């Protein structure tokens, strides 16, 4: 009887394209104390899927901002009862999902804490459904959180670090994803603008004078 989790996964694979993206560990470049367990689990790959009939993943509006984009879903390979979860099909469309579960959209912080506390390797728990570029960027950003635990006492600095890692991973896989230099530049400027807003909201000075230059340049050796 072909109705178990593996059968469901074979069916969803026929409706979606899948890529294994190279996401190696990156050095922490923010001050000590921002993270309490950097690279507690070394990142290596993430399985990214998007509907086979989705349009090319080119840079379009809206700009990347602080809102959780529609279509960003961490689908569970098998049910993980430690994590808040909902039916994946309620949030990820076009994959042929049925009974598969996903991390509840509100539970990124919960997952960051619980994966770390229980030493669960993220790639063993999730694959990433992301149909648009902004969803993919935020998926990579969250993937950085999952592998590098922080108490989130310094939000702007914490998010800056994870943004820089996500951008480095995006650049590393750009050719496979189908992104050109102009698209990467737009993403970098969006992330710089968002980072500037976070520091302003916390009434803190940015750690660098020019955030645009930081994001437009290569992954930094230090701030």
Image (cartoon, rainbow, N blue to C red):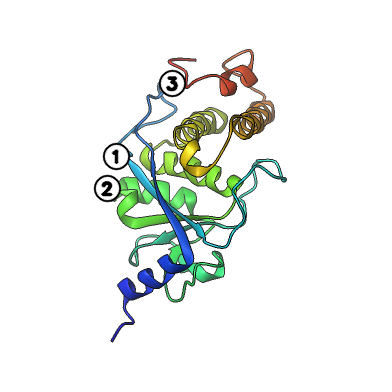
Residue at which label 1 appears: 41
From what the image shows, is residue 18 above or below residue 215? below
- Tell me what residue is drawn at x 64 percent, y 31 percent: 182
Who is closer to the viewer here, 19 or 5?
A: 19
Q: Quadrant of the N terminus?
A: bottom left
Which quarter of the figure has residue 34?
top left
**Dot 1: within a 10 Å radius of its alpha carbon, few (fewer than 14), some, or many (20 or more) residues?**
some
- Tell me what residue is drawn at x 41 percent, y 25 percent: 33
Residue 119 disc label: 2
Q: Secondary structure at mark 3?
A: loop
Q: CA distance from mark 1 to mark 3?
A: 17 Å
Compare marks 1 and 3 and give the one earlier in the sequence: 3
Pick out the residue farthest to the right: 61
- Tell me what residue is drawn at x 40 percent, y 21 percent: 32
From what the image shows, is residue 179 above or below residue 202? below
Picture coordinates of residue 98, whole percent (x, y): 46, 76
Residue 29 disc label: 3
Q: Is residue 188 at least partly visible in the picture?
A: yes
Looking at the image, do the residues carrying marks 3 and 2 touch, with CB atoms under 8 Å apart? no
Looking at the image, do the residues carrying marks 2 and 1 touch, with CB atoms under 8 Å apart? yes
Q: Secondary structure at mark 2?
A: loop
């Amino acid at each position: 009887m072909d109705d178990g989790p593996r059968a469901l996964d074979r069916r969803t694979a026929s409706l979606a394209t899948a890529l294994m993206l190279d996401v190696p560990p990156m050095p922490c470049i923010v001050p000590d104390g921002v993270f309490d367990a950097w690279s507690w689990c070394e990142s290596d790959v993430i399985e990214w899927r998007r509907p086979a009939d989705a349009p090319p993943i080119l840079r379009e509006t809206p700009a990347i901002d602080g809102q959780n984009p529609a279509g960003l879903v961490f689908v569970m390979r098998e049910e993980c009862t430690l994590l808040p979860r909902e039916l994946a099909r309620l949030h990820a469309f076009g994959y042929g999902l049925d009974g598969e579960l996903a991390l509840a959209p509100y539970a990124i912080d919960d997952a960051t804490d619980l994966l770390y506390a229980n030493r669960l390797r993220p790639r063993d728990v999730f694959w990433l459904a992301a149909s648009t570029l902004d969803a993919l960027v935020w998926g990579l950003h969250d993937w950085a959180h999952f592998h590098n635990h922080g108490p989130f006492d310094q939000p702007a600095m914490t998010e800056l670090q994870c943004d820089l890692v996500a951008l480095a991973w995006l650049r590393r896989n750009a050719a496979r994803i189908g992104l050109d230099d102009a698209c990467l530049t737009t993403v970098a400027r969006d992330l710089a603008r968002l980072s500037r807003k976070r520091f302003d909201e916390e009434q803190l000075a940015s750690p660098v004078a020019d955030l645009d230059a930081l994001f437009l340049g290569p992954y930094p050796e230090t701030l």
